[in-house]
Amino acid sequence: MPAEPKTATTPPDEIFRIEQVGKRYGNFDALSDVSFSIRRGTIHGLLGENGAGKSTLVGIISGQKTATSGHVQFDGERIDAKDVRTMENAGVFLVTQEPMIIDHLSAAENLMLGIWPQSRGFVRWRKLRADADRMLAGTEINPAMQAGSLDAVARRKLNILRAMFSGGKVIILDEPTAALTVDGRKQLFDFMRRLKGEGVTFIFISHYNDEILDICDSVSVLRDGKLAGGSDDVSAMTSEQLSELVLGRGLKLFQRKRRDVAAMPVAITISNIRSSHVNLDQLEIHKGEILGFTGLPGAGAKELARCLFGLVPSGSGTIRFHDGDDTAALPQSPAEAFKRGIAFLSDDRRRDGAVSQMAIGRNISLSSLATVSRWGFLNRAAEAHLSARYFASMGIKAASAEAAVDTLSGGNQQKVCLGRVMATDPRLLILDEPTRGIDVGVKQDVLQIIDDLTAQGVCVIIVSTDTDELFRAADRVCVFGGGQLRREFRGAEITIDTLRDSMGEA
Ligand SMILES: Nc1ncnc2c1ncn2[C@@H]1O[C@H](COP(=O)(O)OP(=O)(O)OP(=O)(O)O)[C@@H](O)[C@H]1O
Ligand SMILES: [Mg+2]
């Protein structure tokens, strides 16, 4: 989309105009000379690879960040250097990429944060509770619950609901679906369409082409901080065209050469798991297998993965590594799991302490150093080597491995977390939503790296609701329902449709 010429008057249907916006950190340009406009009452997609500048740009639009150069016009007025509060009062709400939740407040209070019903300066608690109850009806979230004890999906939902019920004119969603379930995503889209009908404008950031094609009217694409293109008619585009616009080249999708598990030696046997959320008689994992776990939330996929890593104490259950190890009880702590060669990537990188002000390199070797994560043993000699290897192979975008992780873009933080668990050289690698937040190009690289690990005999469990990812990477997929293993698909039985259908049925 070419930069529009400056005009004295604003077209009536233009709600935002971004004019030659730049953002500089030190001597790095996160954004340079970005210009485009957004029409009122539309859903405008903002696309780009990890680190392209999407979050930075919406941070500027919403008053979170200040541009180094250029201007932003909102509703015909310049809004340079405004703060979040002012922008929210003007009707612009940003749902940030990482959930923003105040742990010690209740779910209801978080929901109404800053939009609390007030009467002469006093918060009207009764009304707050009533409003929150109404908004949370139909979700699984208890309004009185302390927000700190909510899971990642619930925390995300709270942020989205807050923006949706704010009465705002513009709602900006930075990768909202990355933490939602299939159902949550559908609800969100229905809700967006309804609000759009009432004249609300959306800016929508996502790495999923199907979502962009489904919900967006128009798109703008950033590449290395510059505007790379766009379209005012997304309905005329294909997924391939979107990828090409984002990457500046064609995309080659990863496809694992699926292995026939029947012909592979068994490496791990898990037996008799009885915990509050999972019941499993027996599951065998083969040497070098990629095993998918999927299902709706609470169905048991995530719960079993957490059990195996000792994050949830299991009442009973054993795990046997066939190469030398005797059958032993399931690990009762991550430290124990780690000692037995089990590594785990959490779906909630902020909570599990992955992201900090530490340097990227140190973060990668963290699990091997057993500091923040509190498990494992010291392996300082290998640290530099490991960090360098994964920093390069994951294609982490940063000035150097010395840069602090919290200055990285969301997707690049995810790559650091992935590098970290892979670097521990595990026998069993458990990855919960490994490519969440990762752009479509890097996603292929990540799946390739996992594929390479299995060539060395590592067993991998991928917990995922991304059916496309399971289809491309897994040798076998277990579908969970009601805490039990309901169905199993292998080889050619694994298709996106069969997975999607069976998830709902299980
Ligand atoms: N405080 C900061 N200091 C230095 N660099 C920063 C800072 N904040 C962001 N950056 C850099 O600016 C670039 C753009 O980051 P941004 O978060 O906008 O990317 P993004 O398009 O949202 O990517 P993703 O898809 O991974 O979320 C990145 O290279 C990032 O490392
Ligand atoms: Mg981002």
Image: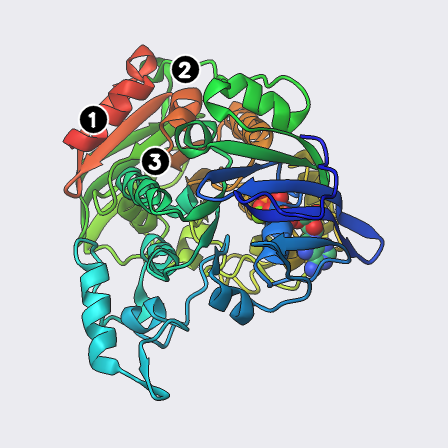
- For the residue marked with disc 1, what is the amino acid? Ser
In the rendered image, is residue 361 in sight? no
Q: Is residue 61 left or right of residue 149?
A: right
Label 1 crowd bin: few (<14), some (14–19), many (20+), radius 10 Å: some
Asked if labels 2 and 1 touch by Cβ distance under 8 angstroms, the answer is no
Query: Does label 3 or label 2 sit earlier along the sequence?
Result: 2
What residue sits right under mark 1 in the picture?
A: 502
Residue 86 in the image, given as x and y percentages of width and height: 54, 70
- For the residue marked with disc 2, what is the amino acid? Arg
Separation of residues labelled 3 and 2 (CA atoms): 21 Å
What residue sits right under mark 2 in the picture?
A: 259
Give the vertical position of 42 relative to 266 (above or below).
Answer: below
Q: Secondary structure at mark 2?
A: loop
Asked if labels 2 and 3 touch by Cβ distance under 8 angstroms, the answer is no
Q: Can you tell which mark lies on residue 465? A: 3
Is residue 115 or residue 291 the one in the foreground? Answer: 115
Is residue 86 or residue 147 the one in the foreground? Answer: 86
Separation of residues labelled 3 and 1 (CA atoms): 12 Å
**Quadrant position of the C terminus in the picture:** top left
- Label 1 CB sits under 8 Å from any ligand 1 atom: no
Separation of residues labelled 1 and 2 (CA atoms): 22 Å
Residue 279: name its quadrant. Answer: top left
In the rendered image, is residue 13 in sight? yes
Q: Nearer the viewer, mark 1 or mark 2?
A: 1
